[in-house]
Structure formats: C-alpha cells, structure tokens
Image (cartoon, coloured by chain):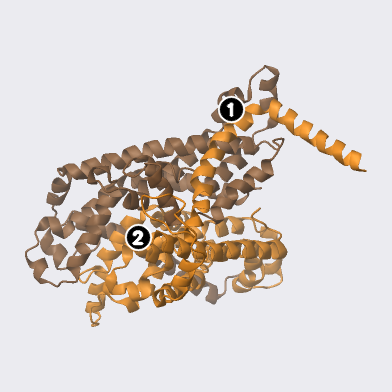
Chain colours: A brown, B orange
Amino acid sequence: MKESWQYKVFKVFNVTVLALIVFVTLFPFFNIVAQSFSSEAYINTGQVSLWPKGFNIETYKVIMSDSMFWINYKNTVIYTVVGTIISLILSTMIAYPLSKTRLKGRRFLTLFFVFTMFFNGGLIPNYVLVTSLGFGNSIWAIVIPNAISVFNMLIMRTFFQNIPDELEEAAIMDGSSTIGILFKIVLPLSKPILATMMLFYAVTHWNSWFPAFIFFTEKELFPVSIYLRNMIKGAEATVGTGATAADNMVQVSANIKSVTMVLTVLPILMVYPYIQKYFVSGVMLGSVKG
Amino acid sequence: MEDTMKLKKTLRKKELWSSIKKDWQLYALVLVPVIYLIIFKYGPMFGNIIAFRRFVPGGSIIGEEWVGFQYFQMFMNDPTFYKVFANTFILAFLLLVITFPAPIIFALLLNELKNQLFKRFVQTASYLPHFFSVVVVAGMVFEVLALNGPINNLLASWGFEKISFMQLPEWFRTVFVSVDLWQTLGWGAILYLAALTGISEELYEAARIDGANRWKQTIHITLPGILPTIVVLLILNIGNFLQIGFEKVLLLYNPLTYETADVIATYRVGLQSGSFSYGTAIGLFESIIGLFLVLGANYLSKRITDNSLW
C-alpha cells in the first residue's frame, strides 16, 4: 500500500519534533560545558550558547587548586564506593533467600520489604533516629539509612529466580553449603545483574546530596554535591540584587558554577554508555517481576 | 475436630522447624537485612509516636509525655499549612496531567521512526537528564533561565521583555513542571517502548489489508496494545501522587517564590528543631494520605488489570 500524503507530512513533522526534543534535552548540558570554557566578557553578555567563546580555562585552574573542592570530591568518591559495597551486600543477602520458593515465610518477608517502599517513617523520625545513633557528621549517616533500594532488590531476586535449579542441585550433591553455592555458583552466574546493580547504586550515591545536607555541619565532610549546592544557592542571592555586582565580577565568578557542574557530572558521563545500556535492561527486568 | 486442628498445628510447626533447620543458612542471610530494616525503616515508623508526644531535642527519642492530637490541631489551625497543602496538590496534579502522558506520546512518535540509527540516537539522548544529580539539574536551570541566559536572550531577540523566572512565584509551577518533563520524558518512555515491541506485526498487516491508514492503526492497534502498561503506570503514579520530588523544590525555590513553591515536605524541612513534634505530625498526615492512595490504587489495579503490587 502506498503511503498517503498525510503520512508523509507526518513523518517530516515527526522527525522535526524529535530532533527538537533532542536539542532541548541536550542544550542545557552543552550550554554549561560551553560556558565553562568561555571567558567572562562573553558569558556575562549572554553570548555563549553551544560553543565556547573566548576560550578560557582559568576557572578550571582555580577550582582544581581549591583544596576544599578536592576534599569534597574525594568524599563523594569514598561515600560512593563504601555506599555501593554496603548496598550490594545487603541487597544480595535479602534477594538470594527470597528467590528460593521453598523458603517458608517468603511471602511475608517480601511484603515486609515492599511495605517500606510505600510507607516510610518520614523525615523527622529518621533524623532523630540517625542522630541519636551518633551517625551525625559521619559517613554512616549517608551510606546506612538508604542502603537498600527495595526496587533494585526485587530485580535481583527475579534474576536469581531464573537461574536453573539443576545447577544448584548438582552442587548440593557435591556437598556444598547454601552459602558455598551462593559464592561458587550463583554470584559468578549473576555478573550482569551485579554490574547493573553496582551502577544503579553508584549513580544514586554519587548524585545524593540531601542526607549530607541535613546531617553534616562540617565542611570537610561534604560531598561535592553540597559544594555545588552551596555555590548555586549562594550565587542565587546576588542575582536578585542587580547588575552592579556583575560589573566587577571576575572570570571565576562568571563560570565557576558551570565548571563545578561539568566536573561533577564528568564521572556520570564516563559511565553513561554503560549505564544507559544496563539501566534499560534492568528496568525491563523489573517490569516482569513476579 | 479439635484434635486434628492441633495435629495440623504441630505438624506445621514441625515443618517450619525442619525447614529452618535445613535452610538455616538462608535464614541467617536474611537476618542481617531484616534487623537493618527493623531499625532503619520500621524504627522511624514507630518514631512517628513523637507526633503525639512532646519532644525535646536531646531528650528521649520517643518524646517526654503524651499530648494527644495537640500537634495535629495545631497544623489544622495553621493557614500556612493549607497553603502548602494546596501547593502540593496543584504541583502533583500538574505532574500527573502533563508529565504522565508525555512519555506515552514520545514513545508513539519514536515508534513511527523507520531509521533505527536516528531512533537509537534520540533515545540515548533523551535518557541523559535522568542520570544527572538533582543539584546539577537545579544548577542548569538557574543558568538557562538566568537574566542573561539563553531563554531570556531568545525572548529579547523576539522583542519580549526579559523575565526573572526564578524570582517570580507565578512562574514557579511552569518552571518546575518543565524541569520534571525534561528529566523524565525519555526515561519514562522505556516501558512503553518495550510494550510496543510486543505488539504482533500480523495485527498491523490485517489492518492494512482492511485499508486502515497509519493513524487508524495507531488508534485501534497500537494504543490498545500498550493500554495495560499505561493503566499500571497510571495507578503507580496515583499511588505516588504526593511525591513530587521535594529535593528539587528545595533547590529551586527561594523566599520570593514560597507563595507557590512551598510544599508540605519543604515546609517541614524549614521548621526549626524546636518543633520536631509538629513537623512529625505533618509528615505523618502526609504519609497516611500517601498510604491510602497506594492501597486504593493497588485495589483498583487488582480489579481492573489483575495486576497487583503484592
């Protein structure tokens, strides 16, 4: 059947709309990258859009030599690594037993976990608990209370469930213990899901800022997200006070925020090819949970 | 009769016991996460008790003495509470009617693309904002909407006056919903795209033979094909109705825009430590509404689609 002229018009319209969506989606990102490499004369007159104008890396030098930036950046790396390890271990410890249909009380345990997805204690009781445990101003305040994502755990459980029982039965014959089977058979077979979960958790921990915002008072403990947040919120106040302040701003204040943003998202961009592949398959997997 | 009941009970007990004995390692594995959950998830639920008790910072974590519904009455009589409650509902409603259907349309448009390379490119690009930290997202918003930023330059070049978007309460909702749309459009389409690949090509062929054009095929085949996915996600969305992403509000608002931007969750954050009990009462109220929405949505889901969250 021939395409009607209406459908031909639609196809042109469709490609145009989708191209426009891509442009709008990527524009803010390319804009801050361009700004981060531009000189203040062009930035402050609003001439930078997608390409750097008056190439300048002065601000990068300034930020890179700021010891607090590096301390906070290092903190983010530590929190991400420690948080991801804790999250992965706890999720595996619950997902594996729940994947065994023979486990008594499995339904109840699942409900026990799923319930926390829909009802939580709320901000203030959480705050009271974490501070009364003495976690305030320590890494534990941010890596422990949000260590398990029930959604991720359910995806893992589904994956474990799909591992053929025969493999494990053979190992039982050989006299392996349950934990032995987990380490010798299940985990090696689960590398794809473990990699997916690692990325899921790592991105979450990397992007986290709110727990640090409420539990940390010492600058030396801040993750880089708080460093950036304070910069954004601090500079925001001067926006309203008018152009007089802008006149004597130097290069650094013109694009210090965009430089920090670029440096903060850099690790995410580096793993983006992997995350977008794994995340999509992970979400698909989660959608067929049983 | 009673004897058989007893027998059954002891049998079941024995069964459970032998199962624990056989699989004690599985139970041992579960133990740590369960204890973790009791402390860090169920603990704070119990901690909500301070909504009914006077709490003194540094004092007992379950409060000092019972005060009944005093704190609930306090916020019921507080005009600010009604304002933040209304703000929350308006934002939640806007998100439901705008950012919920948008990914469906986006997925349908993507589905019409014949060029697979271009399709993959659009998809890959559209997921990107989902992975940015909300702090970076907020930073970008401030840059793009700044007085000498790209949007205002565009407005100026078209002869409009510049708008200080982030300082005007009447712009907050538009900005917030647009940002949410920007973040979730591509990501939200994933499940629909998966459902679209599941629609049999034969159906389209049959429709073509019957002389249905592409638009009719979309209405009569494509949409019904993804309808179950739409219903499930709609119900999940209604369940999370009040969760509008208060972290984003917290980063995007400022005292100038409180009038439209302050929501229940941020209002609570803004409370001083002296009013922990008051804040907890508000939080509990919000959580209970949320729980009812989830239960209601799940009930509907069971009735309509046979899909249940548990």
Extreme residue in the top direction: A174
Horizontal and vertical percent position of residue A67: 17, 42
The mark total stands at 2
Kindly identify which residue carries mark 1: A182
Horizontal and vertical percent position of residue B243: 48, 63
The local crowd at label 1, few if under 14, some if 14 to 19, many if 20 or more residues have their Cα within 10 Å, is: some
Secondary structure found at label 1: helix
- Name the residue nearer the viewer: A152 or A126: A126
- Name the residue nearer the viewer: B69 or B308: B69
**What label does residue B274 carry, if any?**
2
Secondary structure found at label 2: helix
Q: Which residue lies at the image location 27% right of the left edge and 55% below the top edge?
A: A229
The local crowd at label 2, few if under 14, some if 14 to 19, many if 20 or more residues have their Cα within 10 Å, is: few
The chain to which mark 1 is attached is A
Residue B223 in the figure: left or right of residue B134: right
Horizontal and vertical percent position of residue B20: 69, 30
Residue A45 appears in view: yes
Q: Does B307 sit above or below residue B20?
A: below
Q: Does B120 sit above or below residue B182?
A: above
Residue A53 appears in view: no
Q: Name the front one of labels 2 and 1.
A: 2
Horizontal and vertical percent position of residue B116: 49, 55
The chain to which mark 2 is attached is B
Q: Amino acid at mark 1?
A: Leu
